[in-house]
Amino acid sequence: MSPRGQIAIALVFVLVVASVPAWVASDFWLSFVIMSLFYAQLGIAWNILGGYGGQYSFGHAAFFGWGAYATAMAQIHLGANPWLMLPVAAAAGGGIGVVLGWLSFRYGLRGSYFALVTLAFAEVFRVLATTFAVTGAGAGLLIALAPGAAQLQFTTKAGFLYLALAFVALGLAASLWLEHSRFGARLAALRENEDAARALGVDVLRVKLGAIALSGALAGLAGAFYAQYFLYLDAGIAFGPAMSVEALLAPIVGGLGTVFGPVIGAFALQLVAEVARHVLGEAPGLALTLFGAILVGMVLFLPRGLMSLARRRRA
Amino acid sequence: MNYADIVLPSLVNGLTTGAVYALVALGLTLIYGVLHIINFAHGSFLMLALYGVFFLKSGLGIDPYLALPVLAGGAFVVGYALQRSIIGRASHGRDENILLVTLGLSVIVENAALYFWRSDTRTIETPYAFETLELGAILVPVPRAVAFFGAVLVAFLLWLLMTRTDLGKAIRALAKERQGARLVGIDVDHVFAMSFGIGTACLGVAACLLLPMFYVTPQVGHAFVLVAFTVVVLGGMGSFTGALIGGMLVGMVESLSGLFLGESLGQIGVFLIFIAILLFRPTGLLGHRA
């Protein structure tokens, strides 16, 4: 698709979602849109490294968790303003991404090994966060209630919707830039064939580090959003495997390495989860059981995601 | 207080738990060595097998050690069928797809277990749970001794299978050269599924040896999967002896770091070994360069 067409679709999407609070009054549906946007943001972050770069991370919770804990801890322990913490959360997620990426890419870890090492890092952070008092240990962290936009605690759902939408728009812009920049072309080249890319003069390590930094920063922002929206965090939420799985689900369902795949995937998955909740009742494990089945089904029957349906019809 | 009085029993505990880790890791390394698949659902299958042992004991009163053939056979059938019906078909030419499918399977199994059985911690009671053997100055609980020798015995049987039977020969041939194996008339899909089945059968055995001294929750597989991966990368992917030694090493490290760092922080020792090996020596202690 032409870049102009993609930008047009992105703009229409942002405008339509921005208008949602004007014609939807129900808190239930506003929450639905907010959570879909949140998972879209997390999925976009994963997609930059996994979809465009072909480096599958099973531990994106590590970046998410650092962003979330940075936001919560700075408010609780230092009294910082959460707005100021947004760039810090992004820097924390991106910084951890660079450290983790430097360690594993420098030694040439690829494929399954990279997936395992990211998962192990997330687990280490989870154990650390459950142990020390500064992270709230096992009890978690509660951010003090201080309603008002100045404290990034909007009194209406619409406020959070706009914040989540802004993050998604940022993520979409980053994905669009990737698709049409030299950096993105190098990233796609090393995904397709790392040795060939290196032979053509691509600095593989540097490009991978750039991708993981960008991916980690966007995931860190998602973490900051989560902390402000729920005002509660614990180690299991922030660094647990569920968040890592949710991060990779949306792009795989929607379409790996596409601009809009993660967004489509996130909305589709949230819809499935809501319908399941409605039909089968609220129960622990239910939504994720379905998500697991969807993941298996997608890889078996539609490995290029929902986006490939649209493409097939046009062809 | 005598230092050796705490450290020595802790080492023995670690060694016996480590033997079970080794058994879990043997299954994983067999699957990896042949199919070059990292089976992410390995821990979840172990959790299922543990529930199988639990329900056989609590529902029908069958002793875990007597349930062993049932569990091993059942796990074999499940593994064989899964490989033939789902996992073998998922690759579409990319190994990452298989990784994703096994991840999906583990998510399904773990959360379905959570849905049906809730996250209660379940244990079984056996008449021999608190009996001990005296080894010099150390007391070893009977279930731990059984687990240790059971795991070593199964490892020995696996070694016999791999070196002395036609199936073992076929498995090793496939591990080395897929195309060549097919050309000399080996039924590749069947042998792949057999390897996967034997790998999961190890889990059935491990579950029977483990539950008399352990517990089961839906999340328990998650704890085991990373430990088993640690054992496998420590010993070298695909190496049997490596898995055996690695398992016992990891068991002892875990036990000691739990002793010195406390219950919560103690888990970190294993993960740190795991990360360090992946980073600095991905071929493991006994593995060969790919």
Image (cartoon, coloured by chain):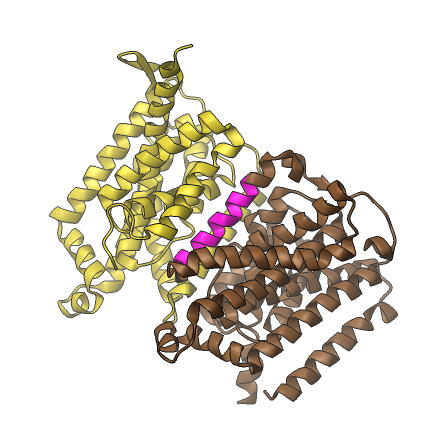
Q: Relative to B196, is A174 on the left or the right?
A: right
Q: Nearer the viewer, residue A155 or A65?
A: A65
Residue B26: % across, % down: 29, 44
Q: Position of residue B31 (x, y in %)?
A: 30, 53
Q: Is residue B208 magenta?
A: no
A210 vs B152, left or right, is: right
In the image, taking residue B60 as reference, residue A40 lies left or right, namely right
Residue at (48, 51) in percent of width and height: A119
Report the number of numbered marks. 0
Span of residues in magenta? A112-127
Q: Residue at x 74, y 68 (%)?
A: A166
Q: Residue B86: tell me if it is visible.
A: no
Q: Name the quadrant of the N terminus of chain B.
A: top left
Q: Predominant secondary structure in magenta? A: helix
Q: Colour of chain B?
A: yellow
Residue B233 position (above or below residue A184): above
User: Percent x, y for residue A6?
Assistant: 64, 83
Colour seen for chain A = brown
Q: Dividing the picture into quarters, in which one does residue A141 lie?
A: top right
Q: Is residue A117 magenta?
A: yes
Quarter holding residue A76: top right
Q: Nearer the viewer, residue A136 or B201?
A: A136
Residue B55 seen by the camera: yes
Q: Nearer the viewer, residue B113 or B156?
A: B156
Residue A259 in the image: above or below residue A292: below
For image coordinates 32% across by 14% down, the residue present is B138
Of residue A244 and residue A213, the one placed in the foreground of this image is A213
The spot of residue B182 in percent (x, y) is 19, 68
The quadrant of the rendering that contains the C terminus of chain B is bottom left
